[in-house]
Amino acid sequence: MQVNERKPLIVAFCCNWCSYAGADLAGNNRLSYPADVKIIKVPCSCRVNPMFILRAFQRGADGVILCGCHPGDCHYTSGNYYTRRRMALLFSMLDYLGIEKERTRVEWVSAAEGAKFAATMNDFAQTVAALGENKRLEDLRCKK
Amino acid sequence: MQRIGVFVCWCGSNIAGTVDVQAVSEALKNEPGVVFSANYQYMCSQAGQNMIIDAVKEHNLTGIVVCSCSPRMHEATFRKTAATAGLNPYMVEIANIREQCSWVHKDMLTGTEKAIILGKAAVAKVNLNTPLVAGETPVTKRALVIGGGIAGIQTALDIAEAGFPVDIVETKPTIGGKMAQLDKTFPTLDCAACILTPKMVDVAQNENIRIFSYSEVTEVKGFVGNFDVTVKKKARYVNEDICTGCGACVEKCPMKKVPNEFNLGMDNRSAIYIPFAQAVPKVATIDPNHCNMLKNGRCGVCSKVCAAGAIDYKQQDEYIQEKYGAIVVATGFNPISMDKFDEYAYNQSKDVITSLEFERLTNAAGPTAGKLLRPSDLKHPHTIVFVQCVGSRCASCAEKGKEYCSKICCMYTAKHAMLTRDKYPDTEVYVFYIDVRTPGKSFDEFYRRAVEEYGVHYIKGMVGKVFPEGDKLKVQASDLLNNKQLHIDADLVVLAAAIEPDKSARPLATMLTASMDTNDFFTEAHPKLRPVESPTAGVFLSGTCQGPKDIPETVSQASAAAAKVVSLLVKDKLKGNPCVASSDELMCNGCSSCERVCPYGAITYEDKEFRMPNRTVAIRRVAKVNPAVCQGCGCCTVVCPSGAMDLRGFANRQIIAEVDAICK
Amino acid sequence: MQKITRDLLVEKAVSLLENGTVDMVLGWKKGEFDYDITPAVFADADSLKDFVFDDFCGANFSKYLISNTKKTASKVLVFLKPCDTYSFNQLLTEHRFDREKVYAVGIPCDGMVDIHKIRAISGEGIAKIECGEKITVSTIYDETVNIEKADVLAERCVTCKSKKHVAYDELLGEDGEVLESARFDEVEKLENMTADERFEFWQGELSRCIRCNACRDVCPACTCEKCVFDNPASPVENKAAANSFEEKMFHIIRAFHVAGRCTDCGECSRVCPQHIPLHLLNRKFIKDIDNFYGEYQAGEEVGSRAPLVNYTTEDLEPGEAVEGR
Amino acid sequence: MNNKLKNTRDEIVRISGVNPKKCMKCGKCTATCPAFDEMEYHPHQFVAMVENGDIQPLLESESLYRCLSCFACVDRCPRGVEPAKLVEAVRLTVIRQKGGNHLKTDDIPALLDENIPQQALVSALRKYAK
Amino acid sequence: MYRISTQSLNTLFEEISRVCTLYIPSENKKGDSVYTRYETGVEYSNKLNTVRSPKDFFFPQMENLMEFKTEGKTVQLIDIREETEDFVVFGVRPCDVKSFEVLDNVFLNEPVDTYYKNRREHGVIISLACNRPAETCFCGTFGIDAAKPEGDVSAWMTEGYLHLKPNTEKGEKLVSAISGILEECDDTAVTALQENINNIMKKLPLANVTTEKFGGGKTEEFFNAPEWAALSESCLGCGTCTFVCPTCQCYDIKDFNTGKGVIRYRCWDSCMYSEFTKMAHGNNRLSQKERFRQRFMHKLVYYPENNNGLFSCVGCGRCLAKCPISMNIVKVMKTLGGKDNG
């Protein structure tokens, strides 16, 4: 039973080649995960600009997750290696600013890992729901 | 301002079962830019597509949003529909309300709510879409086949037959692969050499085919239609063009104690060698690890006996660069190592062998000249135990075996058992199996013949352990149907080792940027609809590099891959992916960050003149993207601080519009 | 050691102007008071009479080279303190100006002072400041205050990372060493706080931001033709700190954009009218980069590959980056 | 399967941590088992019987105590089913059903051997009864 | 005239804040003085200048003007103006008081800016004479008397006492509301202080900067002056001077899409910014020199031309203290005004 009635809002950026396909596979296998997770397709996890993540938080997202191919499996060879560095630094910075570190996550999900995709989203949604509303990166104007 | 049409698909009940499609199309009607919204049972059907085409015409639509299944399924379909209706195909966006909505959510309310939001995001994106036109690139009309086994041979022959030049790169000194090592082939029992070697000769004689044997691919650059490949021809210390393959050197070579890999180490070869009699190319190769001349400069016999003067101890590795339009991967398989299976005493007894070794033992060209003799004492074995699924279907420990079924073992074991009983009726043959899997034309009949006509003992159960005692192998096994534990004194134990992709496949996949599954088998672009293509454009899959398969299946896939290659190579020009990066020169500050992260070298810099205030001119260094080389990953867009670099089709503004729509 | 004085620098500038090596000099120009110097271009020996060099000459000239190298017919003379040389190299790495158009004279530096710190001690109404190891401030109210220079050193000089010049054509005086500095102490202090305390801290600091953009405009790493926050076509453009989110967005993204490129010159914090410790954002990235990917000093050598345009297959996972605290 | 049986089955599955559904019935456990001849029910049967809820015969079977816990079956099982852990779980179930006693005092007279020293009897009770 | 002991300053603040919201200058953690909403515990700071000027109270950096809500295809306009309550700002320096005159000319003349007007009507200014002007002060240049602050209530801090003198109706009302804690007094102490201040003002380093050369009608003379190039040479193009300036009044109107509607807001803009007054054809001032020139020409020539000779600078000295490169209006006036100036 979820005590908190409020539904968290989660934005998931999925790379076209692995994770978006993984999400499709989760669908094919009817593996359910919360509807709070909304997927945005990007060609590669390295397409995700930190600005997109902050923007999502500004607009009221409670959690942002990036999914890409496993390191070494990037369709574009090296994209996810750059993602890994960028997000390591960005997440560390957000943590430094006192933003709850559980609100951001990077997960490597291959096209074959439908089950992992669903499990990841279930877990992330639960974690984010437990944190409650994102108050530290919100823009009050969007809250009304 | 766009004029957007929204089309919500029911997908029968697949979507409509969990999503109120009517509510979705109603809700999206009110989104900015939307002038038309409808829903229909099957948008992908002809009628559905016609509905889109009609709506485009009637409502002067400039953009289309289809709320349906995954874009991976039907994005291409709807883009074509848009093109038919006279729209730019990139004015279409798909909201995935099936795989990512109706199929994963249970109740109507949740599903509908989410579908509306996904629809809104797609509308928000289309509002910012711009027509994109794909660039064209010429196609290099030459194919590369990596691997010279039966898969590679068949693919190369078929491509060459269609009139295109093909190069085969094979790491071994000869083509032929695993099939060359086999004795007979199931289910017809014709001899492998008899059907393979003529094809090898065809390859050698085909004017369109070049063979790079004893070679490997070291670098792959470029993209579909325009691959730049570097092939390393390893030094074989024999001039291929001169060597006649007479074998005089092989005969005279004093170093004769080199384990013969062709016979899986069951006999020896010389340091200079030709792997087998029908090798193609039939050229000698010096094994530098064992040749005394190369190791310490003392010998030189082969050079003296070579009438053609083909021996060249100073030969160096040679790097060949070639352009290709398409690449076929046919890297094949190997049996897995039996080292971890202590219970079968593979490392303790020479008489525990793998099935491939058994092939060599029964092969007329093998170490025993085709007589079935056990390796330890060369005596005729009277009791033979075959163990199935050694390392296959093994989910418990990844370091030991493989989770998948190796597919070919049931059939070749039946073949081995049958042939043994046929040639040596005095031999008792036991086959321990978990299941006997024989789907395939004439396969089950074949297996039943082994049991019914040849009297092979098929026992449902597994061998638990094998241990040598005296000159016997004690086999302890279960007979599940009789609920018994069996103890058999065997002379020979044959293990049906699981097969795994060749070790060279992983680094090759990285070079090709082709994806692999967790077992290192190449992934196909679509498991059903595009089984011979890799998701990486221009890379095709042939044979067991994609998954376990037998010879007939390999050959059909090889031909299928060839057909795909041919249909690519007949094109003079390829339409590229229009979703590529592009740099706004006015904003670019020339910092080179994008150039450094581009995996394709698609970004270069040039000095460009700019008109500045008051009629002055400034020269600035700015980035330029080669749209034919760019693959559209977008890595450069994030390192560009000014946002000068953006990705067409996935522009910053578009993605942010999606974020905004979702976070409303 | 040769004492670097104003006269020595002017002498150098005059000789280089006269022998035609350079046709303009980037230098510090005297202001109304003893502390308000302005970076200026001096085109002839005569104009150099207003040239000053003292403990208030903090301004980093590297960024001015971008525009001035485009104007010169021969070369620009620039005086570079050790910390400025890192910015100089970083700009060269990013092809922001033509090295051939610059004559760089390295000058040693024993730290610049912060007028804000002096004023906090002396009070308002400063009439005269005499520099030296001891700083004497006299006010218009006929008060005189003696201050230890060490007490009023600019923050970036207190934690000076290097007295070594990494680029110059000519060096006046002696070169120093790369220093063991305590510049990450403050960052560490923050890291050791709880997330709530950190949030409280940064909320307090960043909410003062008035988005005057001084930090960005002075930053030698911020050399975009058009900043993403100024570009109306960019989805994040905004002109003023319209909401508490906006400042966070601006400062996080700005720090991210200069991550791996920031040489830690400290100009951002120096110019902030609200005294926001912006260097603590940049230093966090520098510290993380050092920890995660090995020590890296931007601008140490021209052409080095910045950590964010580089990777190894063994890099740590983003989850690990924030774990363990 | 009635509810009680199902509960017992679930309990065994829970305490063993074994998922009997993973078994592909290859029989390698039984092929490996050194105590095969001593057992009425063999490792693969244990797995199948637990899965089928055929628990009662197992609870009553001497086979439980013939298992050497050598873990050969665990080691060899290609699917990671771990039959020995299942056997142990069934043993535990028996003990639990006896209220934590390996032996009930009432059972003792029938098992008595005249040569057993009194002291051994007392210490056995201490050790095996609750 | 009234007075209250400086020891009882907090009593005064408590009393005023009982009547309405009160803002006083207080020192923040960084040692800067900023206007802070008074509540018990907030300490008054008598530093000369606050970082941001009191113009913020009437013309805030960001202000929501209206909101649009969309419902289907209809757009609804919502006035989201908040009714401003009365408030008091204490300790406004004479220069800053003068700045309201500059702003009023812009915002209260037709067409009246009702947002600004509303705030002006609700705000009560208690000014404060400058006992200790700084070296950066040059209010005298613009005819401002640091000893005679204007505003709704004038205040002086003499030895031991704060003196208050209401000047306007609003001021009278406030003083009478708190009269319980005030005592009536004569102006002897204040006159002595004023004399003292006037003496100091004469000694200030910038005392003789004059506006003689500037004012309306000087456009031709200065617009193409060659000096602009050198003056603007090192200008970073940041907005520090603009945003700390009490008289700068430029703003931009922008829309913010919240996803649920659009908020139209205005925020400060700076003529130093490259995107300032960008129009369909692009920007009309392309170089920093032109932008720099605009700012000072506006303050010294264009504004007085349109406002009866009133200069759009009050000599508060904030830009002198805050400019990252120490370029400022005084340097501009001295350079363009010739050698005699200063």
Image (cartoon, coloured by chain):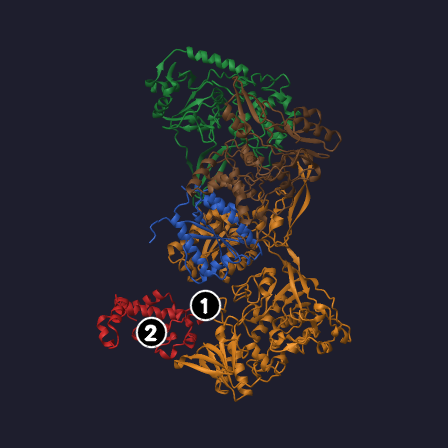
Chain colours: A blue, B orange, C brown, D red, E green
Picture quadrant of residue E292: top right
> Disc 1 or disc 2, which is closer to the eye?
2
Between E281 and E20, the one lying in front of the other is: E20
Dot 1: few (<14), some (14–19), or many (≥20) neighbours within 10 Å? Answer: many
Asked if labels 2 and 1 touch by Cβ distance under 8 angstroms, the answer is: no
Kind of residue at badge 1: Ser
Q: Secondary structure at mark 1?
A: loop
Task: Tell which subunit mark 1 falls on.
Answer: B
Residue A7 in view (yes/no)? no
Kind of residue at badge 2: Tyr
Q: Locate residue B290, reporting x and y percent.
A: 67, 71
Give me the C-alpha separation between circle 1 and circle 2.
26 Å
Q: Residue furthest bottom?
A: B426
Q: Locate residue C136, reporting x and y percent.
A: 56, 23
Picture quadrant of residue D25: bottom left
Q: Quadrant of the C terminus of chain D?
A: bottom left
Q: Which residue is mark 2?
A: D65
Q: Number of labelled discs?
A: 2
Q: Which residue is mark 1?
A: B396
Q: Is residue B535 left or right of residue B108?
A: right
Between B82 and B644, the one lying in front of the other is: B644
Compared to A85, does C160 lie above or below? above
Q: Locate residue C231, reporting x and y percent.
A: 56, 40
Residues at marks 1 and 2, common chain? no
Q: Quadrant of the N terminus of chain D?
A: bottom left
Task: Tell which subunit mark 2 falls on.
Answer: D
Dot 2: few (<14), some (14–19), or many (≥20) neighbours within 10 Å? Answer: few
Picture quadrant of residue E18: top left
Compared to B217, does C63 lie above or below? above
Q: Secondary structure at mark 2?
A: helix
